[in-house]
Image (tube, grey):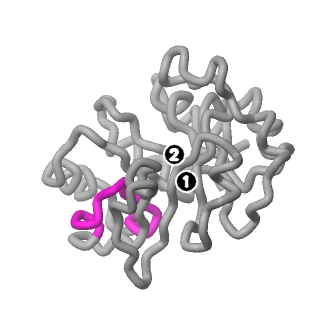
Amino acid sequence: MIVVISPEQNYPKETLWANRLLEVGLECFHIRKPHWDDGAVCKYVGEIDPSYHAKIVLHDRLEVSQTYGIKRLHISEKNRKNKVMEIKEGMTYSTSVHNMADFNELEMIWDYAFVSPIFPSLSKVGYGQNTAVFHQLKSRKNFHTKLIGLGGVAPENISNVYEAGVDGVALLGYIWQSYNPLNSFILCKS
């Protein structure tokens, strides 16, 4: 499973690229725009072809998900720990953790969780230099929640991440720091 996460900052023609990624087989597109209001997120979702809405995951945006009939929500680590969430029937939930101890304690309501940073981040300068969790993956005890590796994932290390036992990877920096997100995705996919 390969997930792409939207960049926090605007990327030129971002929704056009998102549609293209979905068109060539992206399984899951996370819309994470923490500094946007619901109206801006609604406009963004409206620019994604409705045939791909089943592949969209919204970050902490229950109201927007209800507006568009999107059945997938990502609950941030902060909101999960503070229990700022409402579990609804028929929804699929994901979350984030930053170490294997927290991943191993996740309850069964979580379909998958981002574990990060697997490697030093490509999008956040300096993040993960001393806190990368790649070496912790072997301590996995939770197999009811899919483990998605995030942080520093690129074509040159993606096979190592899969060999370490993850169920998928999430791409952010490698996709959105390139001039052609589609080519970057295809390189990771192959």
Magenta highlight range:
52-65
Local crowd size for mark 1, using a 10 Å CA cut-off: few (<14), some (14–19), many (≥20): many
On the rendered image, what quadrant is the N terminus found in?
A: bottom right
120 on left or right of 159: left
101 drawn magenta: no
Q: In the image, is residue 142 above or below residue 186?
A: below
Real-space Cα distance between discs 1 and 2?
Answer: 8 Å
Foreground: 105 or 70? 105
Q: Residue furthest bottom?
A: 89
**Percent from the top left, x then y, of residue 173?**
51, 29
Foreground: 46 or 125? 125
Q: Which mark is residue 151?
A: none
Q: In this figure, which residue is indicated by the disc labeled 2? A: 4
Foreground: 100 or 186? 100
Q: In this figure, which residue is indicated by the disc labeled 1? A: 26
On the rendered image, what quadrant is the C terminus found in?
A: top right
Foreground: 140 or 168? 140
Q: What's the residue at 38%, 79% (across, down)? A: 88
Q: What's the residue at 76%, 65% (across, down)? A: 143
What type is the residue that disc 2 sits on?
Val
Helix, strand or loop at disc 2?
strand
What type is the residue that disc 1 sits on?
Leu
**Percent from the top left, x then y, of residue 71?**
40, 73
Nearer to us: label 1 or label 2: 2
Q: What's the residue at 23%, 58% (across, down)? A: 46
Q: In the image, is residue 19 above or below residue 144?
A: above
**Percent from the top left, x then y, of residue 20?**
44, 47
Lower sequence index among marks 1 and 2: 2
Q: Pointer 1 and pointer 2: residues touching (CB < 8 Å)?
A: yes
**Percent from the top left, x then y, of residue 32?**
36, 46
